[in-house]
Amino acid sequence: MEKDQVQVDLGTLMANVTGRLVALEDLFREKILYDENKENLLDKLYQDLQANRLDVVESNFRSLYKELFLLYDNLQREIAKFSNSEDQTAKNSLEFIAREFLEILARRDVEIMPREEYFCDRQKQKVINTVATSIPLEDGKVMEVLQDGFTHRDRVLRVQSIVIKKYESQEVLEDGNTSRD
């Protein structure tokens, strides 16, 4: 009987150990899943924090940039005053300051929008005025930049104010009036 008792105790003990091992394995799986979920959540929180931090920094700088752009506009007006002046030294000095100003902005990834002739991009430009043209291919072509625009890493900080050409077909009617299509 003792032999049977030992076998029963051994069988019970083995079943008990096996049950505990299965329970431990389940606990480890749960812990691993918990850790993976926690790591994914922390990664997402870190990414959100970085994005929000950049947005906060950018919004704080946005007001500073607006003031700097106004300073740049004033500088451009002063340069324009010397365009017909004989005092080229003052004009050259102001132009140098304007170039340095733009260089400081460029080091902070703020770029002035190009002034070359091209067609209106309503995402980056604001049409202030139009000038009639009878040439259909010139419709929407930038004729003049009134105020420079600026971007920061391809995001518009200030739109460029422009004058564009607007196609207008005109026919002289019999009574001398002009009609537009």
Image (cartoon, grey):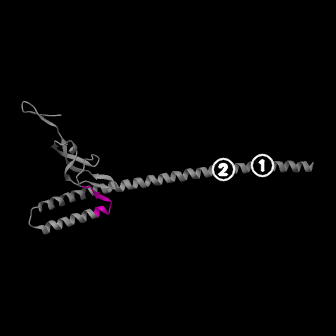
Frontmost residue, 95 versus 72:
95
Frontmost residue, 8 versus 149:
149
Mark 1 touches mark 2? (CB < 8 Å): no
Residue 89 position within the rendered picture, expressed as x and y whole percent measured from the top left: 13, 69
Mark 2 crowd level (few <14, some 14–19, many ≥20, 10 Å Cα): few
- What secondary structure is found at the residue carrying circle 2? helix
Asked whether residue 102 is drawn in magenta, I would say no
Region of the chain picked out in magenta, as a range: 104-114
Q: Quadrant of residue 92?
A: bottom left
Image check: 15 left or right of 102? Answer: right
Residue 52 position within the rendered picture, expressed as x and y whole percent measured from the top left: 40, 53
Residue 37 position within the rendered picture, expressed as x and y whole percent measured from the top left: 56, 50
**Amino acid on which the number 1 mark rests in the picture:** Asn
Task: Say which residue label 2 marks.
Answer: 27
Instruction: Give me the residue at 54% from left, 53% from top.
Output: 39
Q: Quadrant of the C terminus?
A: top left
Task: Say which residue label 1 marks.
Answer: 16
Image check: 80 left or right of 141? Answer: left
- What secondary structure is found at the residue carrying circle 1? helix
Q: Quadrant of residue 104?
A: bottom left
Frontmost residue, 38 versus 142:
142
Mark 1 crowd level (few <14, some 14–19, many ≥20, 10 Å Cα): few
Instruction: Give me the residue at 33% from left, 60% from top.
Output: 109
Residue 82 position within the rendered picture, expressed as x and y whole percent measured from the top left: 12, 63
Q: Earlier in the sequence, mark 1 or mark 2?
A: 1
Q: Label 1 to label 2, Cα distance in Å?
A: 16 Å
| Vertical placement of residue 134 versus 56, above or below | above
**Amino acid on which the number 2 mark rests in the picture:** Leu
| Vertical placement of residue 114 versus 165, above or below | below
Image check: 13 left or right of 116? Answer: right
